[in-house]
Image (cartoon, grey):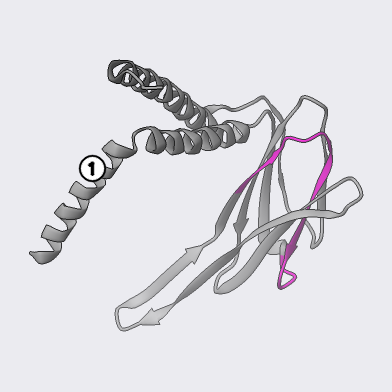
């Protein structure tokens, strides 16, 4: 069946506008990821021993919780790999996270110098019902040199980010398929411009 060019153009206009609306919704999802903060239900600063476990973090059906972990290293001229393991209710490891915390200093021809990366922040989202724990370690048994602040909040913006990411990928795919002629023409123009720039 032959498609009316006018009808085809109108359909393309409709679907492009629909994809634009979805793209705006995706942008809102990304914004809420950074701005949505639930009620703080626990906040405390710790000086923990090696292998100490924080928890339980209990997530009921229909709930989600966000755990923010801020760590700081004390002491000079040392390197500590600080890590955490998220455990399930049977204390089995679900996943791990970590970072090298370090400080270096000394003297050279210009005098005293100092460089460091002492801090780490992790955001852990618990979106599935269950009971969770977090166990902390260092690679050199120097947990006494680490200060921890743990904040647990109701709700999490991470599902918003995941939804926005999935939808924007679908929108990009559909846009390229439905506008492949326009995309092809502009890619050719871009390629010509890049060739001219390389010749110069």
Tell me if residue 55 can be seen: no
Image quarter where the C terminus lies is bottom left
Tell me which corner region of the image, top left, top right, bottom left or bottom right, holds residue 136.
bottom right
Q: Is the magenta stretch mostly helix, strand or loop?
A: strand
Q: Residue at x 63, y 69 (%)?
A: 80
Q: Which residue is drawn at 21% across and 54% down?
A: 191
Q: Is mark 1 on a helix, strand or loop?
A: helix
Q: Name the residue under label 1.
A: 185
Instruction: Please indicate whether residue 48 sits to the left or right of residue 124 in the image.
Output: right
Tell me if residue 200 can be seen: yes
Query: What's drawn in magenta, residue-wise?
Result: 122-142
Tell me which corner region of the image, top left, top right, bottom left or bottom right, holds residue 81.
bottom right
Instruction: Work out whether residue 126 or residue 69 is closer to the camera in this orientation and state it.
Output: 126
Instruction: Please indicate whether residue 91 sits to the left or right of residue 84 in the image.
Output: right
> Magenta stretch: residue 131 in it?
yes
Residue placed furthest toward the bottom? 109
Q: Position of residue 2 (x, y in %)?
A: 36, 22
Q: Position of residue 135 (x, y in %)?
A: 79, 54
Q: Are there few (<14), some (14-19), or many (20+) residues within 10 Å of tag 1?
A: few
Q: Is residue 56 above or below residue 37?
A: below
Instruction: Work out whether residue 182 or residue 118 is closer to the camera in this orientation and state it.
Output: 182
> Magenta stretch: residue 5 in it?
no
Q: In this view, does 116 lie above or below 13?
A: below
């Amino acid at each position: 069946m032959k498609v009316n060019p006018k009808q085809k153009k109108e359909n393309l206009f409709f679907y492009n506008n629909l994809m634009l609306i979805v793209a705006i919704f995706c942008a809102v999802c990304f914004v809420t990821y950074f701005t949505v903060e639930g009620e703080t239900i626990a906040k405390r600063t710790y000086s923990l021993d090696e292998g100490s476990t924080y928890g339980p973090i209990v997530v009921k059906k229909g709930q989600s919780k966000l755990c923010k972990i801020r760590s700081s290293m004390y002491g000079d001229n040392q390197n500590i790999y600080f890590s955490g393991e998220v455990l399930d209710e049977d204390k089995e490891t679900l996943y791990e996270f970590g970072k090298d915390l370090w400080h270096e200093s000394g003297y050279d021809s210009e005098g005293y110098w100092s460089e460091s990366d002492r801090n780490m922040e992790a955001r852990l989202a618990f979106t599935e019902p269950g009971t969770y724990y977090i166990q902390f370690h260092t690679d050199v048994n120097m947990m006494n040199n680490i200060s921890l602040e743990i904040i647990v909040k109701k709700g999490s913006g991470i599902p918003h980010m995941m939804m926005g990411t999935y939808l924007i990928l679908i929108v990009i795919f559909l846009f390229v398929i439905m506008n492949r002629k326009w995309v092809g023409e502009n890619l050719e123009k871009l390629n010509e411009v890049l060739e001219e720039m390389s010749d110069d």
